[in-house]
Image (cartoon, grey):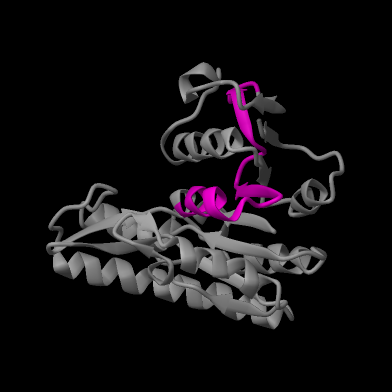
Amino acid sequence: MILIKLGGSIITNKQKPLTANISAIKRIASHLKKVKEPYMVVHGGGSFGHYWSVKYDMHTKPDRYSIRGVSVVKNSMVELNRLVLQVFLQSNLNPYCLPPSDFIFGNKPITKKTKEISKIANTGLVPISYGDVMWHGKNKFYILSGDKIIGMLTRILKPRLAIFVTNVDGVYSDIKNRKLIYEITAERPTVADVKMDVTGGMNRKIREAIYMSKGGTDVFFVNGKIPQRMINAVNGKEFEGTLFRGK
């Protein structure tokens, strides 16, 4: 199967809290209808979950965060997921909501339940999960990013390929001069070994992509503003973006 991560930067307007980019989601959904093999979608939080997690100072490290914050972040991600599901339905796709708590407990995937995802995808449904605030035990919670979920899924499901759909063309060695890196090999052991100009969320995506490619999965970074690039990557055609070639 194929794993697709829709970045919060492409499906929401990060400059406006709690604002989904419905037109972008529609364009992506219309192109996903061209995919003729099983796939799963995981989306980020953007101006929904990310906005509130910053407000309540919540992080990926398990801790006793504000219970009010936990509730607000959780509900904002459910709301964004509802909008994504609605657009997919309107686009004549068959989305199937899979909250991360269905197959992840603590900060580890439940192998047996994770393996069931491929069976769900093989029915013609499109499993859709999302970054979320998760229970860790002992009154502790943590933020689980969609990027991390994709990494977890890849290790168990061994997809044919994985795609990160972002709001930029790929990984740049020089953002100012728009110098795109077209291919990164799995032999590079750390992010520091890849000469690039990235910060924050993109840095995290690259770490996951390197780890995934070391496991043998080809990982693509493409610009969601031009969703045909996503389909070109799926079909093995030439595309504009960055490939982390599987080892």
Task: Verify whether residue 155 appears in magenta.
Answer: yes
With respect to residue 112, does 151 lie above or below? above
Q: Quadrant of residue 157?
A: bottom right
Q: Is residue 199 left or right of residue 215?
A: left
Q: Quadrant of residue 11?
A: bottom right
With respect to residue 36, does 168 lie above or below? above
Q: Is residue 71 left or right of residue 40?
A: left
Find residue 10 and report its horizontal and vertical position in percent.
57, 54
Quarter that holds the C terminus: top right
Q: How many marks?
A: 0
**Nearest the camera: 129 or 222?**
129
Find residue 147 and report its horizontal and vertical position in percent.
48, 49
- Residue visible at 41% across and 62% down in the picture: 110
**Nearest the camera: 198 or 102?**
102
Find residue 243 and report its horizontal and vertical position in percent.
69, 34
* Residue 123 appears in the rendering: yes
Task: Verify whether residue 165 appears in magenta.
Answer: yes
Find residue 185 and report its horizontal and vertical position in percent.
65, 25
Q: Is residue 20 left or right of residue 239?
A: left
Magenta residues, start to end: 149-177
* Residue 16 appears in the rendering: no
- Residue visible at 78% across and 69% down in the picture: 33
